[in-house]
Every structure is written in C-alpha cells, then in structure tokens.
Image (cartoon, rainbow, N blue to C red):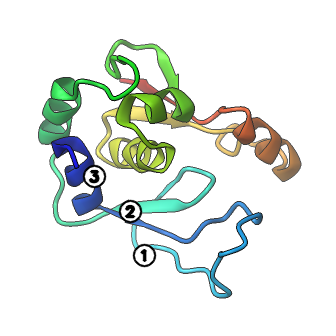
Amino acid sequence: MNNLASYIRNHVERGSCLCGKCVDAPTVSMQPTGHTSDVIYFKVCAFGEPNAEELRRLIVAHPGIFSQVDLFDGQEHNYQELGGWIGNQELALMLMGLGELLELWTLITPRSLGLPNDLVRLMTGAGLITIQSK
C-alpha cells in the first residue's frame, strides 16, 4: 500500500454503507461519532490527529495509479476520477471526506445542494460527488 493510502486508512473512520443496495450491509448501521463528512455512500470522521499539510504533501507526491490528477488546481474532481488516480473509489471517497474535514477543499454532493433523495441517488451514481480546492 502506498504512503497516501496508508495515511488515509490510518486517519479515517468509515461508517457502514448507506447506499441501500449492498447485500452484505450490516443489519445495524455503524456510523462514526463526532464531526463527520457525508460522502453519500457512507460517512467518515478523522481520528489520530491528521495534519492538513502532511496530507497535502502526500497528495502532491502521489504518482497516480491509472491517471494523473492535480487536486489543488481549483477544478472540480469527482470520486470516479480520484478513484482512478488513487486506485480505489472507496479510498477516493475517504480522501474526499478527510480533505473536507481538514479544510483542504469543499465537498460538493447532490445532498449538499439540497436535492431530494431520489435525485441524490441518481446523481451520485453518475459520479456527482466532487471536491474543489480552496
């Protein structure tokens, strides 16, 4: 596992899946406590005192698995694009939530735009969970 992936896994608590479609979903939803980031599919919270500058350094140093992405270019980047860059969409969503909590970027989701749940699910499936650096 690369340094960025290890850092994310060591500093993010991920809640149970909230998509409603997973066959292996727990019967009781386990969600992180405290300040969380809602990445639609699940919620995340930071633990172990992650540092914004350390995370930024690891992001800049990450070579990209299947593509190249500059998360700090001011453009919007969705979880599918970041999944190709980091190698895993779940990890991409965890990174997006952690970066929001550390105030590296703004997380934009259909839910944050105040849309109804059926439209949230449809838009989320189309990749419309994005970040934009501050």
The residue pinned by badge 3 equals 8
Q: Position of residue 106 (x, y in %)?
A: 45, 33
**Cβ–Cβ below 8 Å for labels 2 and 1?**
yes
Q: Position of residue 131 (x, y in %)?
A: 48, 30
Residue 45 tag number: 2
Q: Position of residue 109 (x, y in %)?
A: 63, 39
Residue mark closest to the camera, 1 vs 3: 3
What's the residue type where badge 1 is placed? Thr
Residue at screen point 40% across, 14% down: 74
Q: Position of residue 55 (x, y in %)?
A: 19, 40
Q: Quadrant of the C terminus?
A: top left
* Nearer-N-terminus badge (2/1): 1
Residue mark closest to the camera, 3 vs 2: 3
What's the residue type where badge 2 is placed? Cys
Place residue 120 in its image quadrant.
Answer: top right
Lateral position of residue 119 relative to residue 30, left or right = right
* Nearer-N-terminus badge (3/2): 3
Place residue 67 in its image quadrant.
Answer: top left
What's the residue type where badge 3 is placed? Ile
Residue 33 tag number: 1
Lateral position of residue 77 relative to residue 126, left or right = left
Place residue 130 in its image quadrant.
Answer: top right
Compare residues 117 and 65 and report the one nearer the observer: 65
Residue at screen point 65% across, 33% down: 127
Q: Secondary structure at mark 3?
A: helix
